[in-house]
């Protein structure tokens, strides 16, 4: 839980953060980073290093093993702390609030950042911590095209790559597609503006036909830019009086992907099924797909 991370984060000093960074770097080459490798990076004596590692272990910042040698991995709490430290230094985040979303592969929290002018109110933002690889490295590797050629694989790599991938595509799409504004990225975390309105699955629409047309229009815009969301549903579409916004982009594919047509159809099918089920609104799947691809 982020509350536990924050309690520990406030007590971490530069040496603790350097230990966490050393383990993070070491995990590129080791499943369990040897104590000697951490010592080389931190330049701490073994006694001081082991004392601090024990404290980090008890705080769930790291996990360790004694077999076949003494080694350590950074845990999600420790990785969260490193990302938060960077965001705070950059001024991207000044305080974190409640958890507002949790799934198999991410945790989302409310936060604020300080305004540029001291007299202005704090600016609300969202922090999304990616959690890819937390439950099953093999499953994540199997279903993520961008991981299939990676031999040495850790949850750090999966979560970090997913966050970078999502942040990069959000930067590309923002100003062209209705998505929250991406603000900052570090490691496995993204800071972004809050999505406008409420999530579709929990919203009772007064004008469902208008909203459905807005969603299909945005899918067409995304497709015209050579992109398919590939994980779109009522769970990652926000609705407001201004229109709709799509979130959760790490699984996007390009239109030249070998399964592009299948993934586009799945996105559209998910959307149409929701409106048919909840509002008895029907549209022909073939016609919708043709309209999306028209003039592209």
Image (spheres, grey):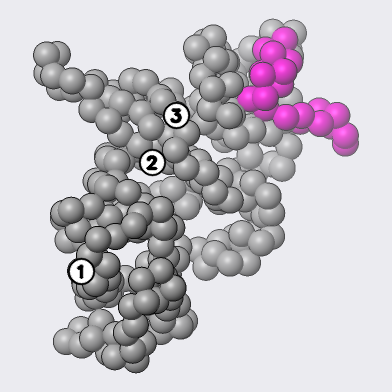
Which quadrant would the C terminus be assigned to in this image? bottom left
Check residue 285 for magenta coloring: no
Label 1 and label 2: CA atoms lie apart by 31 Å
Task: Please indicate whether residue 166 sits to the left or right of residue 244 in the image.
Answer: right
Magenta stretch bounds: 51-71
Tag nearer the camera, 1 or 3: 1
Taking the image as drawn, is residue 80 in sight? yes
Where does label 3 land, which residue? 98
Label 2 and label 3: CA atoms lie apart by 16 Å
- Where residue 209 appears, as percent x and y from the top left, is 24, 72
Where does label 2 land, which residue? 190
Quadrant in which residue 97 is drawn: top left
Check residue 66 for magenta coloring: yes
Q: Earlier in the sequence, mark 1 or mark 3?
A: 3
The answer to whether residue 1 is above or below residue 281 is above
Q: What's the residue at 16%, 87% (across, down)?
A: 295
Judged from the image, the secondary structure of the residue bearing numbered disc 1 is helix
């Amino acid at each position: 839980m982020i509350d536990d991370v924050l309690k520990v984060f406030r007590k971490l000093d530069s040496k603790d953060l350097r230990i966490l960074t050393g383990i993070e770097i070491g995990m590129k080459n080791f499943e369990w980073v040897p104590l000697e490798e951490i010592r080389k990076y931190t330049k701490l004596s073994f006694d001081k290093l082991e004392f601090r590692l024990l404290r980090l272990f008890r705080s769930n910042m790291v996990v360790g093993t004694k077999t076949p040698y003494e080694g350590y991995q950074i845990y999600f709490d420790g990785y969260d702390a490193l990302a938060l430290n960077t965001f705070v230094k950059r001024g991207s985040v000044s305080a974190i609030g409640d958890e507002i979303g949790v799934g198999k592969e991410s945790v989302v929290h409310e936060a604020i950042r300080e305004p540029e002018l001291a007299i202005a109110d704090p600016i609300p933002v969202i922090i999304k911590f990616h959690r890819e690889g937390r439950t099953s490295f093999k499953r994540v590797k199997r279903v993520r095209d961008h991981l299939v050629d990676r031999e040495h694989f850790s949850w750090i790599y999966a979560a970090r790559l997913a966050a970078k991938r999502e942040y990069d595509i959000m930067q590309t799409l923002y100003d062209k597609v209705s998505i929250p504004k991406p603000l900052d990225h570090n490691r496995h975390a993204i800071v972004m503006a809050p999505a406008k309105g409420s999530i579709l699955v929990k919203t009772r629409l007064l004008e469902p036909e208008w909203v459905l047309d807005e969603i299909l229009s945005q899918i067409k815009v995304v497709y015209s830019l050579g992109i398919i969301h590939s994980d779109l549903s009522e769970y990652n579409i926000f609705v407001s009086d201004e229109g709709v916004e799509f979130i959760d982009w790490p699984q996007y594919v390009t239109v030249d992907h070998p399964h592009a047509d299948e993934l586009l159809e799945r996105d559209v099918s998910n959307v149409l099924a929701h409106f048919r089920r909840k509002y008895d609104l029907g549209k022909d799947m073939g016609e919708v797909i043709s309209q999306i691809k028209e003039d592209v």
